[in-house]
Amino acid sequence: MLFLAVTLGFFVENQREHYVEHQRENQFIQSLFNDLKKDTANLTRIINARNKKEYDLDSLSFLMNSDSSKQFIKQIYFYAVTASRTLYYRFVPNDGTMQQLKNSGAFRLIRKRNVVDSITTYDINVRNILSQWSVEENLIDHYRDASTKIFDGRVFDKMIDENAGIIGLPEGTPHMQPYSEREFYEWNYRLYGMKVINKGNRRDLKLLLKQAEILLVVLKKEYHLE
């Protein structure tokens, strides 16, 4: 009888642990699911913003290299001041749950292999996107340096409001600095680099968005989420 009682007690305790772990698994998955929904919304916004940024960079390049560029100084200043903006185009993942899963060893709670694989793939690609950000920041810094030889910073200053927002086209009749052909070629090259990295990041963000949407479908199916 004692042996039976001990065995039964062990069985009950084991079942209780499985139940607790199953509950924790569901909690982590629900939290991750909520984070992913925020990520998809954020990614969609940033991709749309990068579409707009491509248009702005193309417009800046076209106007600056146009034979009639002097007629569009105000527009050029507007596109030039927006070109170096960064934070609005940066993807910051909602990764609180992901960090908990990785740092606490809670990944072991997820019993379904396809779910673990999907989560891992998404996380790897998020890290890849984040690593590209330093490359883009470096290119933008080079663009800013080249722009100091072309534009008057006082004009930029009057275009920014107290919250660092862009008011609109500059007032009056702004002028650009006298620049050499060499300085103009350098500026154009820096702008070209920004255009390329913007397109590359937009492409990778679209892929990440697709992976996030796939992962949401997997989690919804495997855990009956809404």
Image (cartoon, grey):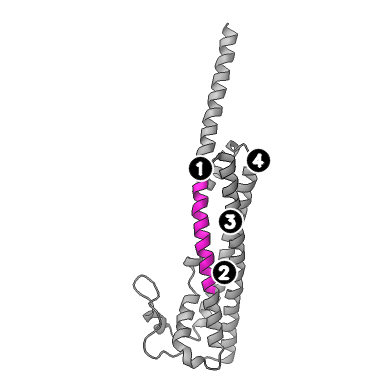
The answer for how far apart the CA atoms under marks 4 and 2 are is 35 Å
Task: Name the one closer to the observer, 31 or 108.
Answer: 31
Disc 4: which residue = 113
**Residue 37, x across and y down, in percent:** 51, 52
Task: Name the one closer to the observer, 83 or 177.
Answer: 83
Left or right: residue 149 versus residue 159 is right
Disc 2: which residue = 136
Disc nearer the start of the sequence (2/3): 3
Tell me the kind of residue under disc 3. Answer: Val
| Secondary structure that dominates the magenta span | helix
Dot 3: element: helix
Indicate yes or no whether the magenta region holds residue 49: yes
Disc nearer the start of the sequence (1/3): 1
The answer for how far apart the CA atoms under marks 2 and 1 are is 34 Å
Q: Which of marks 3 and 4 is in front?
A: 4
Disc nearer the start of the sequence (2/1): 1
**Residue 108, x across and y down, in percent:** 60, 37
Task: Name the one closer to the observer, 45 or 185.
Answer: 45
Left or right: residue 111 versus residue 164 is right
Dot 4: element: helix
> What is the quadrant of residue 220 in the picture?
top right
- Residue at x-position 65% and y-position 43%: 114
The magenta region covers 30-53
Dot 2: element: helix
Disc nearer the start of the sequence (4/1): 1
Disc 3: which residue = 126
